[in-house]
């Protein structure tokens, strides 16, 4: 429970920053109708603009590579005991709930533990939840620090019983981008597959 509350606290801190920006959870469509999201609407935010990271096969991915799809980007690590698997299962279920539109949703998992998460491990971990999920890995601590700054996420290594058994507290929310590659939503942990699917459906319209 301590690990969960710690991660939740990091997420809450990030949400607090978003709140200071005066961002709401609704948007207005071209037809004048108001769209209400479950996630925090961060449309127009000056951060979370893009990334350039390699997958398990050494291929470099950028946000622009997913044009035409809604992207759910989540930061975590493969030895995460609760938040990470829960979130990825949730995204996989949301894709299923969307039916054929689910093919236009791309989940991207980025590890905050490049020390232990090798490219092969990250690839296998992401694909275990859905074959279409992509796992990406910073090349090392410096690239991870730059990425964290660019997305305004936080992470912290917590010592374990041995040097290799540490855990990583990290921001537990996900970033959602629309098919045009614009950051739109900040989905808090455990939002629920149904709510996530509804938000994604509105972005895909």
Image (spheres, rainbow, N blue to C red):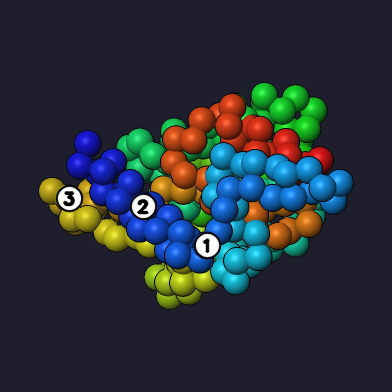
Earlier in the chain: of badge 1 and badge 3, it is: 1
Observer-nearest of 192 and 170: 192
Q: Nearer the viewer, mark 1 or mark 3?
A: 1
Is residue 131 something that shows in the picture? no
Q: Nearer the viewer, mark 3 or mark 2?
A: 2
Residue 83 placement (x, y as % from top left): 39, 39
| Residue 12 image label | 2
- Along the polypeptide, which appears first: circle 3 or circle 2? 2
Q: Residue 88 appears at what percent x and percent y?
A: 51, 37
Q: CA distance from mark 3 to mark 2?
A: 24 Å
**Can residue 202 be seen?**
yes
Looking at the rendered image, the quarter that the N terminus falls into is top left
Contact, mark 1 vs mark 3 (Cβ under 8 Å): no
Residue 34 is marked as none
Provide the residue designation for mark 3.
160
Q: In the rendering, at what x and y percent does residue 185 appear? A: 60, 51
**Side (left or right) of 20 relative to 156:** right
Give x and y (percent) for residue 50. Answer: 64, 66
Under circle 3, the secondary element is: loop
Give the number of marks: 3
Q: Residues within 10 Å of mark 1 (few under 14, many from 20)?
A: few
């Amino acid at each position: 429970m301590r690990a969960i509350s710690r991660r939740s606290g990091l997420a809450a801190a990030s949400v607090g920053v978003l709140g200071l920006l005066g961002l709401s959870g609704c948007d207005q469509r071209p037809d004048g109708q108001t769209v209400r999201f479950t996630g925090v609407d961060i449309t127009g935010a000056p951060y979370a603009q893009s990334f350039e990271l390699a997958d398990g096969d050494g291929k470099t991915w950028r946000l622009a590579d997913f044009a035409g799809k809604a992207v759910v980007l989540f930061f975590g690590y493969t030895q995460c005991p609760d938040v990470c698997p829960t979130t990825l299962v949730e995204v996989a279920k949301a894709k299923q709930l969307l039916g054929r539109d689910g093919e236009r949703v791309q989940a991207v998992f980025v590890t905050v533990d490049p020390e232990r998460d090798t490219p092969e491990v990250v690839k296998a971990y992401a694909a275990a939840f859905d074959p279409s999920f992509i796992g990406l890995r910073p090349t090392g601590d410096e690239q991870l620090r730059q990425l964290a700054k660019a997305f305004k996420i936080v992470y912290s290594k917590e010592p374990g019983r041995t040097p290799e058994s540490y855990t990583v507290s990290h921001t537990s929310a996900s970033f959602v981008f629309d098919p045009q590659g614009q950051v739109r939503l900040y989905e808090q942990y455990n939002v629920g597959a149904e709510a996530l699917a509804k938000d994604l459906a509105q972005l895909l319209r």
